[in-house]
Amino acid sequence: MAYHHFEDVRRMTKVLAGFLKQGGKLIVSDFRAGGEVRKDVAHVVAHAHGMAEDVMRDAFAGAGLTDIVIEDAFDYTLSERVLHIFFTVGSKARRQN
């Protein structure tokens, strides 16, 4: 759950996807955008409000990943704030023969 800390999630996704073998999967867990931001961390967290589904889908597609699935996982309470955790999964295409 660190994607919300990365300023450029598209670039980070491309880097991570580059390590995948053909047919490999990238799985990222983070919390959904929305809600209040803790004032003590807002200045150091690029996406302090969490990650939007369209941002994640765009980053995965931009990295050449396919079969992108975004699913809710669970809710987590942190400092009286409920975070809605979700997974984004994408596959690195297999080469066609």
Image (cartoon, rainbow, N blue to C red):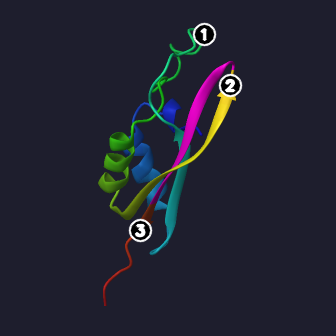
What stretch of residues is rendered in magenta?
Answer: 79-89
Q: Quadrant of the N terminus?
A: top right
Q: Quick check: is 31 in the magenta stretch?
A: no
Residue receiving disc 2: 78
Tag count: 3
Q: Position of residue 57 (x, y in %)?
A: 35, 49
Of tags 1 and 2, the one toward the viewer is 2
* Spatial separation of the CA atoms under disc 2 and disc 3: 34 Å
Q: Position of residue 43 (x, y in %)?
A: 50, 13
- At mark 2, the secondary structure is strand
Residue 6 in the image: above or below residue 58: above
Q: Farthest bottom residue?
A: 97
Which structural element holds mark 3? strand
Q: Which mark is residue 40?
A: 1
Under tag 1, what secondary structure?
loop
State the CA–CA distance, disc 3 to disc 1.
Answer: 38 Å
Three-letter residue code for mark 1: Asp
The residue at 68%/25% (across/down) is: 78
Q: Disc 2 or 3, which lies upstream in sequence?
A: 2
- The residue identified by callout 3 is 92
Give the image quarter of residue 94: bottom left
Label 3 sits on what residue type? Lys
Which is closer to the viewer, label 2 or label 3?
A: 2
Amino acid of disc 2: Leu
Magenta residues: mostly which secondary structure?
strand
Rendered view: 86 above or below 93: above
